[in-house]
């Protein structure tokens, strides 16, 4: 993965994108990073995420929006591979603003694919989501399961992205790996996501809202394990021309909301204070990744247990300026 060719990372200033960018740079890659500093959360947070990358000589940053195409046509870089992480994220906000999610996650992905075709760039790693499984009754979730019943606009835009990448693979022989991320957490996690939000509320002695009885579960996956999977997918598209794969990246170990909350209170050394509320529309009952395909094709093996990952997150949170 070294050499004169560069890797384009969209969404490089976000939670996963910034960790990935640093790993790529540490691996000797040259990286062009794209981010539009979407106002979904504070620009300052994303600028801080980029601090290390911006100081690296092999990193070039472009502030741009994938919904626009002017910057793509003027991008002067020898790009070999694209890792497409940029997206409007979040299930509940997508129910309130579906048009925004369609324009960014579908039209933006189309713009990127069309540009790749025009530049003869044939290697793509695409960030999809476990949300595409909806309320799948069968567990664990396998890549061969039906995913034609999305229960949020976010989910259907991510499934649409997978279908778009297949079309470009079929027509233009692109080598594509679609990675379905399962509830990624860790340092720099978005402030709207449950773990970050809960830790902040516990720190402030505010009651945690628990939607439902706490029996919903998520396959929480620590960010370094997810980045391991992305790096392996990058190697895979480099070594396997004209391939198309969909691969789960999870922890294969669902945890209930009740257990998550109890663990956070214990790590924060606080007395539990929970407010029970009705379940929210668009929320799935559980996520649970079958990672056997990831193990077989990518050598993927997540190794950070929840207690360790949450401890690292709490330490990071406490070290942040308030």
Image: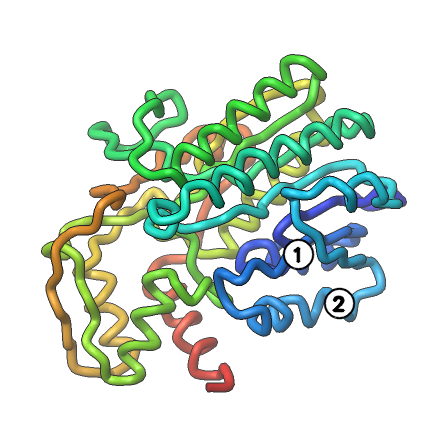
The numbered disc on residue 32 is none
CA gap between label 2 and label 1 equals 13 Å
Q: Is residue 92 left or right of residue 49?
A: left
Element type at mark 1: helix
Question: In front here: 241 or 307?
Answer: 241
x and y, in percent, of residue 109 in the image = 60, 35
Instruction: Name the residue located 58 percent from the left edge and 47 percent from the top edge.
Output: 86
Q: Where 18 sits versus 114, above or below? A: below
Q: Where 317 sits versus 277, above or below? A: below
Mark 2 in CB contact with mark 1 (< 8 angstroms) = no
Question: In front here: 83 or 99?
Answer: 99
Instruction: Name the residue located 44 percent from the left edge and 56 percent from the top edge.
Output: 222
Sequence order check: which comes first, mark 2 or mark 1? 1
Q: Where 111 sits versus 62, above or below? A: above
Element type at mark 2: helix
Circle 1 Cα neighbour tier, 10 Å, few/some/many (<14 / 14–19 / ≥20): some
Circle 2 Cα neighbour tier, 10 Å, few/some/many (<14 / 14–19 / ≥20): some
Q: Is residue 320 left or right of residue 218?
A: right
x and y, in percent, of residue 286 in the image = 24, 42
Q: Is residue 154 left or right of residue 209?
A: right
Of badges 2 and 1, nearer the viewer stands 2
Question: In front here: 213 or 102?
Answer: 102
Quarter of the picture containing the N terminus is top right
Instruction: Name the residue located 16 percent from the left edge and 51 percent from the top edge.
Output: 279
Q: Which residue is mark 1?
A: 23
Q: Where 216 sits versus 293, above or below? A: below
Q: Which residue is mark 2?
A: 54
x and y, in percent, of residue 194 in the image = 32, 62
Instruction: Name the residue located 12 percent from the left edge and 55 percent from the top edge.
Output: 278
x and y, in percent, of residue 187 in the image = 49, 67
Residue 125 sits in quarter? top right
């Amino acid at each position: 993965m070294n050499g004169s060719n560069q890797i384009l990372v969209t969404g490089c200033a976000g939670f996963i994108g910034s960790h990935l960018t640093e790993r790529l740079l540490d691996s000797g890659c040259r990286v062009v990073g794209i981010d539009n500093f979407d106002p979904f959360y504070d620009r300052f947070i994303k600028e801080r995420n980029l601090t290390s990358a911006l100081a690296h000589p092999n990193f070039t940053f472009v502030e741009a929006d994938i919904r626009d195409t002017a910057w793509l046509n003027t991008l002067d870089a020898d790009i070999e591979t694209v890792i497409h992480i940029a997206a409007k994220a979040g299930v509940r906000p997508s129910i309130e603003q579906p048009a925004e999610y369609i324009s960014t996650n579908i039209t933006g992905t189309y713009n990127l694919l069309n540009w790749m075709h025009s530049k003869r760039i044939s290697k793509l790693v695409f960030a999809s989501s476990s949300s595409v499984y909806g309320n799948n009754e069968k567990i664990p979730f396998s890549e061969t399961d039906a995913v034609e019943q999305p229960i949020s606009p976010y989910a259907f835009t991510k499934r649409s992205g997978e279908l778009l990448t297949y079309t470009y693979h079929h027509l233009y022989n692109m080598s594509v790996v679609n990675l379905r991320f399962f509830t990624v957490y860790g340092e720099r996690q978005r402030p709207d996501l449950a773990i970050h939000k809960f830790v902040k509320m516990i720190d402030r002695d505010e009651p945690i809202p628990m939607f439902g009885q706490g029996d919903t579960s998520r396959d929480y996956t620590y960010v370094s394990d997810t980045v391991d999977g992305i790096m392996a997918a990058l190697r895979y598209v480099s070594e396997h021309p004209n391939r198309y794969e969909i691969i789960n990246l999870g922890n294969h170990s669902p945890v209930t909301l009740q257990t998550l909350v109890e663990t956070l209170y214990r790590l924060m050394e606080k007395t539990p204070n929970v407010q029970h509320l009705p379940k929210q529309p668009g929320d799935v009952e559980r996520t649970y990744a079958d990672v056997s395909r990831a193990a077989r094709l990518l050598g993927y093996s997540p190794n950070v247990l929840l207690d360790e990952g949450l401890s690292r997150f709490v330490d990071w949170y406490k070290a942040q300026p308030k």
